[in-house]
Image: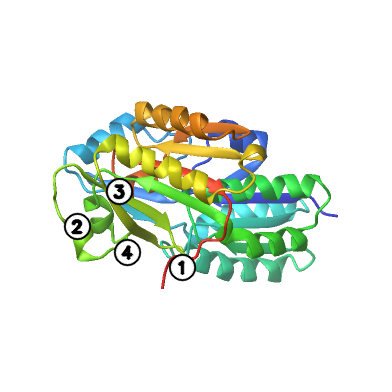
Amino acid sequence: MAELAIFIDSTGDLDTELRKKYDIGYCTMGLSFKGKEIPASLDWDHGYNPHQLYDVMREGEKIFTSQVTRQEFIAKFEPELKAGKDVLYISCSSGLSKSVDLARIVSKELLEQYPERKIAVVDSLITGYAQGDMAIRARRMFEDGKNLDEIVEWLEANKLRFHQWAAVENLNYLKRAGRVKASSAFFGNLFGVKPILISDIHGNNLAVKKVKGRKPSLLEIVNSTIASAEDIENQTIYIAHSDDLEGAEFCKEELLKRAKPKHVHIGILGPIIGGSTGPGTIAIYCFGKEVTEGE
């Protein structure tokens, strides 16, 4: 069985340590603001640390994001094919990016040059550490002897069991970026009201609830995570934040009071996700019951 190269993209949010541990690469998206274009680096080596980038947003600067380019896909996939490896790309949700469509086109072209190899493209229908967790699970399955077809079959059958529960300061950033599905009621400016977001069956960010107050909104996503998770004692729960480590630690503390996950990993929301949701966002990701929300 050929070796397997596994890729996510800049919305997958896995930090350097996790990507290195599980041998996961990523295809870089782009950011632009203040007349600059920079790569959306998950290693934050593009000249801005997380605090600096989110301060740019706090100052009112609009962040523009761009999908993975053709050149980037070729640059990442072709060396692996040349080395005799097959490729698995777990993409950002098609509800939020067209990267998955371009990846399929590029993959078809590359396979004409490397017909003995395989490239599989999976639409994750989610983002963040849930997308990254799919890649981690894929690597573990490969190490356990599963082949590429078996891994893809499992991912396609289970991708709606990956959950995102996020508390945002407001929906202004997401609305401006066109990255949220919500009724007009969610766009009000009632003081202290915090929207709760999920990823729905179509891979869209869907506002499902409003909670009064910051801490109650964080408790809401903690309790919702526990309610939607299955076999929580044997999985890692991922908590990600956009420049609010204190809020992430609070969620971890409250989660551990209520449940006994195998591990809790706290990380940073990457520049694409954070650049769309805005500073102060806290998101929790788990694996569990199948997501059913969405039209």
Which is closer to the viewer, label 3 or label 4?
4
**What kind of element bears circle 3?**
strand
Report, in whole angstroms, how far the alpha carbon at label 3 lies from the one at label 2. 25 Å
234 horizontally vs 62: left or right: right
For badge 3, the amino acid type reads Ser
210 horizontally vs 197: left or right: left
Residue closest to the eye, 234 or 159: 234
The answer to the question of whether label 3 and label 2 lie on touching residues, with beta carbons closer than 8 A, is no
Neighbourhood count class around disc 3 (C-alpha, 10 Å): few under 14, some 14–19, many 20 upward: some
Task: Point out the tag, 3 or 2, that comes first from the N-terminus.
Answer: 3
For badge 2, the amino acid type reads Phe
The answer to the question of whether label 4 and label 2 lie on touching residues, with beta carbons closer than 8 A, is no
Instruction: Give the residue pinned by disc 3.
Output: 32
- Residue visible at 61% across and 57% down in the picture: 89
Report, in whole angstroms, how far the alpha carbon at label 4 lies from the one at label 2. 11 Å
In the rendered view, tell whether residue 237 sits above or below residue 17. below
**What kind of element bears circle 2?**
helix
Instruction: Give the residue pinned by disc 2.
Output: 187
The answer to the question of whether label 1 and label 2 lie on touching residues, with beta carbons closer than 8 A, is no
Task: Point out the tag, 1 or 2, that comes first from the N-terminus.
Answer: 2
The answer to the question of whether label 3 and label 4 lie on touching residues, with beta carbons closer than 8 A, is no
Residue lying farthest to the front in this orientation: 258
- Residue visible at 50% across and 34% down in the picture: 258
Task: Point out the tag, 4 or 2, that comes first from the N-terminus.
Answer: 4
Report, in whole angstroms, how far the alpha carbon at label 3 lies from the one at label 4. 24 Å
Report, in whole angstroms, how far the alpha carbon at label 4 lies from the one at label 1. 11 Å
Q: Which mark is residue 181?
A: 4
Instruction: Give the residue pinned by disc 1.
Output: 202
Q: Could you tell me if residue 134 is visible in this image?
A: yes
Report, in whole angstroms, how far the alpha carbon at label 1 lies from the one at label 3. 27 Å
Which is closer to the viewer, label 1 or label 3?
1
